[in-house]
Amino acid sequence: MNMLERIKSQIWAILWTAVILVMCNMKMPDTSGSGFFFEGFDKMVHLGFFYVLTIFLFFGKIRYQHNYSFRSLTIFKVILIGAALGGFIELVQWKIFTYRSAEWWDFGCDMVGVFMGVFSFVLLHLFNYEKR
């Protein structure tokens, strides 16, 4: 299969990555005193962003190969993509968008989201495998 088909299969992950990049680097209004936002809200957002990204990456892989089989290398690549994107965002926040704060906790929550996505995929894969 050619590269264009591979990219088309990952379109949701690519679009979601763009959403993550925009949302994590835009200037946020002052939310102190707001009842909706709470301490740690930012960490939950990071976790959710990267959980969804991980699911989209696996979904694209399934669409590309037309089956649910996977290898450990696929999981490693997904984790590596998540870590690279999370690290890149924190680096950009630290050096370019200085009105945002780069934090190790944000990166940690990114990785928790990635590992939650991996766990979800592996669990569903094992469930489907046992059904056959």
Image (tube, helix red, strand yellow):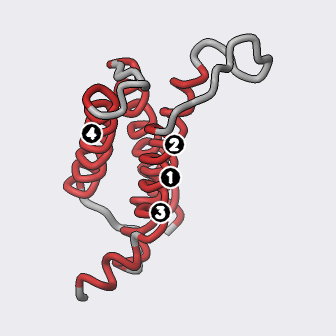
Residues marked 2 and 1 touching at CB (< 8 Å): yes
Question: Residue 83: x and y, percent?
Answer: 27, 39
Q: Residue furthest bottom?
A: 1
Which sits in the foreground, 57 or 74?
Answer: 57
Residue at image mark 1: 19
Residue at image mark 4: 88
Disc 4, SS? helix
Q: Amino acid at mark 2?
A: Met
Q: Nearer the viewer, mark 2 or mark 3?
A: 2
Question: Residue 45: x and y, percent?
Answer: 56, 33
Residue at image mark 2: 23
Residue at image mark 3: 15
As measured in the structure, the alpha-carbon distance from the residue carrying label 2 to the one carrying label 4 is 14 Å
Vertical relation: 55 (above or below) 117: below
Q: Residue at x 29, y 34 (%)?
A: 96
Q: Earlier in the sequence, mark 2 or mark 4?
A: 2
Q: Amino acid at mark 4?
A: Phe
Q: Amino acid at mark 3?
A: Leu
Vertical relation: 108 (above or below) 111: above
As measured in the structure, the alpha-carbon distance from the residue carrying label 4 to the one carrying label 3 is 17 Å
Residues marked 1 and 3 touching at CB (< 8 Å): yes
Residues marked 2 and 3 touching at CB (< 8 Å): no
Quadrant, the N terminus: bottom left
Q: Earlier in the sequence, mark 4 or mark 3?
A: 3
Disc 1, SS? helix
Q: Amino acid at mark 1?
A: Val
